[in-house]
Amino acid sequence: MGGGAQIISNITEGKNWYDDLAGAAIGGALNGTILGITGGETLLTMGVAALASGSAQSVINEAESYLRGDKQLNESSLEDSAMDIGINAMENSALNFVGNFTGANSIHTDINWTKPSSWKSFFDLKYGQKVLMQTSVGSIMSLAWSQAEYSHNMYSDMDSDRNHVSRIVAK
C-alpha cells in the first residue's frame, strides 16, 4: 500500500516514479505486519507499528539518497543525514499513527477472528483483509498529506517568485 501511494505521489510531484519507493514499501509492509500480528487494536500496538515503520522508511530513504547521488558521503552530510532521519522518522511515524488510528476506528477487526497462519491465508481470511483495508486508509492519508505539503510548498515558491518580481518591477 505504501509503495503504491509513493509512486502516485512521485508522479504527481514530477519526481522519478521510483524515488523513495523502497522505504515506503518496506515501511508499509512493516506497519501492516506489526498490525496484523498484534491485532493493532490498542494505541500501544498502533504506536509501535507506526514508529517502527516510520523509522525504517526514513533510514531507507536516506540511504537511497546516497545511492542516487543526491548526497555525497562525507562528515558534514552524515551529520545532516542523522538530523534528517530523526525529523523524517518523527513525521512519518506521526502520519502512520494517525493512519493506523483512523483505519482501526473506521474498519473494525476482532482480535478473536481466526488469524492468518501464512502469507497466503492472510489474504484469504477476513481478519487479514480487514487489516489490509486499515493500512490502505493510512496510505491514502499519507498520500493526501504529501500532496497537501507539495501544493503548499509549490504555492509558497510561487508567492516568493511573485514578491521577487514585484520588487524588481518596483525598482
Image (cartoon, rainbow, N blue to C red):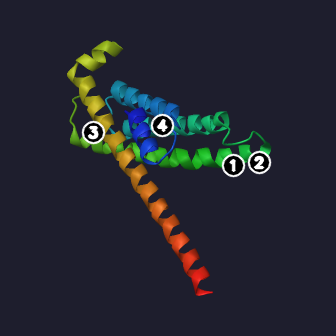
Callout 3 amino acid: Ala
Quarter assignment of residue 25: top left
Q: Residues within 10 Å of mark 2 (few under 14, many from 20)?
A: few
Residue that badge 4 annotates: 17
Residue that badge 2 annotates: 76
User: Which of the two discs, 3 and 1, labels the residue nearer the N terminus?
Assistant: 1
> Mark 1 and mark 2 in contact (Cβ < 8 Å)?
yes
The residue mark sitting in front, 4 or 2, is 4
Above or below 170: residue 93: above
User: Which of the two discs, 4 and 3, labels the residue nearer the N terminus?
Assistant: 4
Residue that badge 1 annotates: 80
Quarter assignment of residue 128: top left
Q: Position of residue 114 (x, y in %)?
A: 23, 18
User: Which of the two discs, 2 and 3, labels the residue nearer the N terminus?
Assistant: 2
User: Which of the two discs, 4 and 2, labels the residue nearer the N terminus?
Assistant: 4
User: Gap in Å between the C-alphas at discs 2 and 3?
Assistant: 41 Å
Callout 4 amino acid: Trp
Outermost residue toward the right in this view: 75
Outermost residue toward the front in this view: 169
User: Gap in Å between the C-alphas at discs 4 and 2?
Assistant: 29 Å
Q: Residues within 10 Å of mark 3 (few under 14, many from 20)?
A: many
Residue that badge 3 annotates: 104
